[in-house]
Image (cartoon, rainbow, N blue to C red):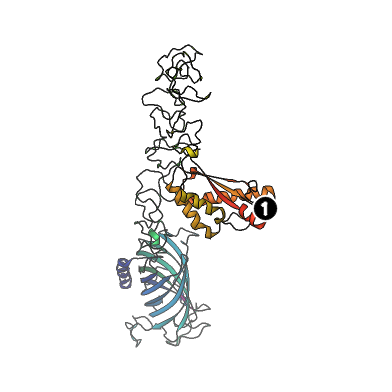
């Protein structure tokens, strides 16, 4: 009874140290209490709870190897004996130690790795020694005290166990295991195998002796305290167990879940986000920048016209521009300079109700009969010698050629006001010079650069790859074009006559396109540049000489001012 009370008290104390071992706490120090059970020549005490209590206690130290395996050391100290009758009995003290390996079933293959319940099996190897209990009368004169255990020799033991652990939290758990210990001895219970007489009391061997070595079992209740540094694979300061993003790159700032911080909440982590202040709710691309589906330069979340056709100029709200305010976008407006307040048709042109060719807002005779010739005011003509629609008495240019558009004074239109009539003006929308047929003068700096480009832009033989030494010249050309936004450029590629026609057309086109691409990449607006390859169709020298061929292999820049 006293031994049972001691055992229960030890069990109660041990519960105060409950813990468990995990991947985050790789080292476990355990406090064990146990009931020891003998099996040998006196009989079988395994799972025989009517037997006297033989309590033991001890420590264990285990190391986490993997989700499946632990390895450790265990030592136990306590009473050992068997009671069959007042005559057939023995008792003493046993101390043992072992190295063990443990296979856990909550390894992700059989049970979930994070399961609170962890069944396991164990196998080890160790030694056991025996001493006399100091409470026993060593003289043997007191018949009420148990006979002594035989202490000679050290046993080799092989402990085989099965158990179950319940994980309370990351640092605490409780465990029960049953361990059966094989030994290599049959002497400590005072009975020798094979019927040898008892060497202590000079009595015959026990009549019920069994062949083989003695063994003992242990019911072990373990309460362990686990400690160690939590595993943090990506070194972000969040243990893997709590890390939702366990593969975060090095030095990236993370939140409490271990995931990269996303300050603007757009779904793109700050370390990848090139637009870190995107407003909430805006759709973004893979770089974290607001999307611009129609590529008009206005982010979708600000764009009130998100499906604008490609290349159309838009205002700050992303809608096509309507410079004359007539309700028809410029890219659809065939009359983009309609005066304010004038009613227009679907094409953006002023209404002409009587169809006489004079817009209603200018027509002083809005009900002219169909087919009547009218003057600039929309009224029927009296006499018009040059047939321009302006009566001679009002016509200040009475000899205007036929079919030439004229103004209200009967003079040919000069839209850009440069003094060159539109029908003679090669750049009717851009003010220019008379000597240039109404087009602006190309600056000398540009002419010089374009002349250098004839032979200064070189390519790898037979390819469209621009040689690096040509880049400085191309950079100068790009700068001139950026500073002169009215220049429209056609990049023309030309070859000599070496090779077939189709080959040279393709090569010249590829080279012209390569130059165009380079200029666009260096800041020139895309819609200002076109490219065309002419092969050897436009030679500037004879292809019969090397010098002539060299001149024919060239890149030309042709400037215009209007599409």
> Looking at the rendering, in which quadrant would you find the N terminus?
bottom left
Q: Predominant secondary structure in magenta?
A: loop
Q: Is residue 312 above or below residue 261?
A: above
Of residues 427 and 12, the one drawn nearer to the viewer in this rendering: 427
- Magenta residue span: 210-215
Residue 415 lies in quadrant: top left
Q: Is residue 460 above or below residue 122?
A: above
Label 1 crowd bin: few (<14), some (14–19), many (20+), radius 10 Å:
some
User: Residue 388 appears at what percent x and percent y?
Assistant: 49, 21
Image label count: 1
Residue 206 drawn in magenta: no
User: Residue 449 appears at what percent x and percent y?
Assistant: 50, 52
Is residue 506 rendered to the left or right of residue 18?
right
**Res 87 seen here:** no
Of residues 11 and 101, the one drawn nearer to the viewer in this rendering: 101
Of residues 212 and 90, the one drawn nearer to the viewer in this rendering: 212
Residue beneath the point at 52% across and 25% down: 401
User: Residue 122 appears at what percent x and percent y?
Assistant: 47, 70
Residue beneath the point at 45% across and 88% down: 199
**Res 72 seen here:** yes
Q: Secondary structure at mark 1?
A: loop
Which residue is denoted by mark 1 in the rendering? Answer: 543
User: Residue 56 appears at what percent x and percent y?
Assistant: 36, 74
Of residues 469 and 380, the one drawn nearer to the viewer in this rendering: 380
Residue 232 lies in quadrant: bottom left
């Amino acid at each position: 009874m006293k031994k049972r009370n001691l055992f229960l008290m030890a069990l109660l104390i041990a519960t105060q140290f409950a813990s468990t071992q995990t991947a985050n706490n790789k080292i476990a120090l355990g406090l064990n209490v146990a009931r020891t059970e003998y099996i040998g020549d006196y009989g079988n005490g395994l799972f025989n709870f009517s037997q006297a209590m033989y309590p033991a206690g001890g420590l264990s130290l285990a190391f986490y190897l993997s989700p499946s395996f632990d390895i450790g050391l265990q030592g136990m100290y306590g009473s050992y004996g068997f009671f069959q009758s007042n005559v057939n009995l023995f008792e003493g003290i046993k101390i043992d130690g072992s190295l063990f390996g443990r296979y856990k079933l909550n390894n992700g293959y059989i049970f979930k790795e994070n399961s609170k319940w962890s069944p396991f099996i164990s196998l080890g190897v160790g030694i056991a020694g025996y001493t006399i209990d100091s409470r026993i009368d060593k003289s043997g004169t007191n018949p009420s005290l148990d006979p002594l255990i035989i202490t000679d020799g050290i046993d080799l033991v092989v402990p085989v166990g099965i158990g179950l652990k319940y994980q309370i939290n990351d640092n605490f758990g409780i465990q029960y295991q049953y361990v059966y210990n094989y030994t290599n001895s049959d002497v400590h219970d005072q009975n020798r195998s094979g019927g040898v007489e008892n060497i202590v009391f000079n009595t015959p061997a026990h009549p019920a002796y069994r062949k083989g070595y003695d063994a003992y079992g242990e019911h072990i209740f373990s309460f362990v305290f686990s400690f160690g540094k939590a595993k943090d694979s990506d070194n972000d300061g969040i243990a893997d167990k709590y890390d939702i993003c366990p593969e975060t790159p090095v030095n990236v700032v993370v939140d409490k879940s271990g995931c990269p911080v996303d300050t603007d909440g757009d779904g793109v982590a700050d370390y990848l986000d090139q637009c870190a202040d995107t407003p909430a709710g805006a759709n973004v691309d893979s770089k974290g920048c607001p999307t611009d589906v129609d590529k008009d330069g206005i982010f979708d979340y600000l764009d009130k016209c998100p499906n604008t056709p490609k290349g159309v100029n838009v205002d700050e709200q992303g809608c096509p521009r309507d410079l004359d305010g007539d309700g028809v976008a410029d890219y659809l407006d065939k009359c983009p300079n309609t005066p304010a307040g004038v009613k227009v048709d679907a094409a953006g042109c002023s209404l002409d109700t009587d169809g006489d060719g004079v817009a209603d807002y200018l027509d002083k005779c809005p009900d002219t009969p169909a087919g009547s010739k009218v003057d600039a005011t929309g009224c029927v003509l009296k006499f018009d010698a040059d047939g321009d629609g302006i009566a001679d008495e009002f016509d200040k240019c009475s000899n205007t050629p036929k079919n030439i558009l004229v103004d209200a004074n009967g003079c040919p239109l000069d839209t850009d006001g440069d003094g060159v009539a539109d029908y003679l003006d090669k750049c009717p929308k851009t003010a220019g010079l008379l000597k240039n047929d109404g087009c602006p003068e190309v600056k000398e700096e540009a002419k010089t650069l374009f002349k250098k480009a004839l032979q200064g832009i070189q390519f790898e033989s037979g390819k469209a790859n621009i040689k690096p030494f040509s880049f400085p010249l191309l950079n100068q050309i790009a700068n001139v074009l950026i500073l002169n936004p009215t220049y429209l450029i056609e990049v023309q590629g030309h070859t000599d006559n070496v090779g077939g026609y189709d080959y040279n057309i393709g090569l010249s086109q590829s080279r012209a396109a390569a130059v165009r691409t380079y200029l666009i990449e260096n800041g020139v607006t895309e819609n200002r540049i076109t490219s065309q390859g002419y092969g050897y169709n436009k030679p500037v020298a004879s292809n019969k000489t090397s010098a002539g061929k060299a001149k024919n292999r060239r890149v030309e820049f042709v400037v215009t001012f209007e599409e």
